[in-house]
Amino acid sequence: MTAPRGTQDVIPPLSGRWQELEARIHELARGFGYGEIRTPAFEATELFIRGVGELTDIVEKEMYSFTDRGGRSLTLRPELTAPVVRAALENSLLSSGAARLYYLGAIFRYERPQKGRFRQSHQFGVECFGYAGADADFEVIQLAWELARRYQISGLQLHVNTIGDERCRPAYRSALKAYFNAHRASLSEDSRRRLERNPLRILDSKAPEDAAVIAGAPPFESMLCDACRAHFDMLKHYLEEAEIPFTINPRVVRGLDYYTRTVFEIMSDALGAQSAVCAGGRYDDLVRSLGGPNLPAVGFALGVERFLMVLEGSPASREAQRSGVQLIALGSEARERLVHLLGYLRQSDGLPAFMDYEDRKLLAQLKIADRNNARYALIAGDDELAAEQLVLRDLATRQDRRIPFKYEKDTAAEIVKMRL
């Protein structure tokens, strides 16, 4: 038996990197004032038709839907914003207007598996409810950018755009419709079908035959109403003041129907062709469309698998992933002493400590330390025991130094003080 196509098993040492990222996510989100929300893995199919949009690729092509024994149509969640809104309304979390929520969970989409894209994947996302100003847009963008900054990831690009609101979007939709109608013969079948009902969705097309036509489409920014222009100008001001570099990209529209005004993507070329690691924007009409009050909102979703793949290409991040010590015994007497030391180290708070109990050569044990992502190795053989010393090797720099080793308990206490 094998795992279903488009899924993967997360096993050591990769699972350790997942845990480390998840811990950072929880710490960062709480630091911005967000509380965690967890929703069911499946919801009523109607939630996604109403929330995501009937003509989106997700609803038309990618949802895993089924009818249960009670005759209800249910769908494995293909995204988490609509479920979060449903849960917030059902549990009266929006009764006072403002709420900051974040999630970390699996989503399911039927699409062609490829590097960084799975049929079951995981997302970290935030949803900020109740604030209509660009300050909230800035907050969620900064939260996502801060996660990347803390990992010292280079080469990321923030692309921002605005798609207006119900006041200026009709005029832009008419301009798009006229433009695409003039190039109708060059469009893909999907884009021709969407031309009458939602020409804005053509800008999000990934069909190769649409690329040249889309490149010449009129930008939305040229047709903004005064309120949307002021909102976008303020967001740009906040980003500039925070020294977060960005590019205005008129082709960023996002593939879901609920977005208004601000939309953005954080791009990376670490997976080959440039692709979005994180994306989001403002969705002021979604809460109302799902039966709630007229409440503004903004948020983002970040692909966990893609983010981890970006980290793999970052030397600084790989070094940061290392933590703890690997105890390496060369001989039976050293093994007995180091097992005692290991026991004391594991009584400490927060210091990962590993040891292999087989008779292996030093090189083989160092390879095990690398698989455990240990930062240091503590090495003891007969010579070290005779000198009452241990070799402490930095596995990032491969530099050695010696530390005293007379009493296991005392040595453990000294190692903990070193904050390895």
Image (tube, rainbow, N blue to C red):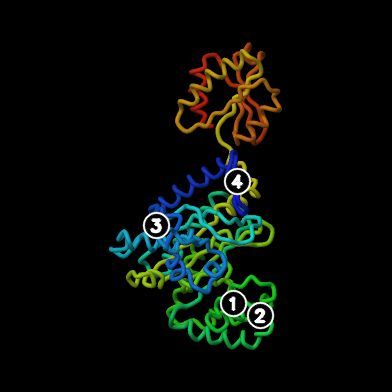
Q: Earlier in the sequence, mark 3 or mark 1?
A: 3
Cα–Cα span, label 1 and label 2:
9 Å
Q: Secondary structure at mark 3?
A: strand
Q: Hey, what amino acid is under mark 4?
A: Ser
**Residue identified by numbered label 1:** 202
Q: Hey, what amino acid is under mark 1?
A: Ile
**Neighbour tally class for label 2: few under 14, some 14-19, many 20 plus, Cα within 10 Å:** many
Q: Which mark is residue 187?
A: 2
Q: Which mark is residue 75?
A: none
Quarter of the picture holding the N terminus: top right
Q: Position of residue 194 (x, y in %)?
A: 57, 79
Cα–Cα span, label 4 and label 3:
27 Å
**Residue identified by numbered label 4:** 317
Q: Which residue shows up at 57% across the image and 67% down it?
A: 61
Instruction: Determine whether 220 is above or below 114 in the image.
Output: below
**Residue identified by numbered label 3:** 101
Q: Secondary structure at mark 4?
A: helix
123 or 300: which is nearer to us?
Answer: 123
Q: Nearer the viewer, mark 3 or mark 1?
A: 1
Q: Hey, what amino acid is under mark 2?
A: Leu
Q: Nearer the viewer, mark 1 or mark 4?
A: 1
Q: Which residue shows up at 33% across the image and 63% down it?
A: 89
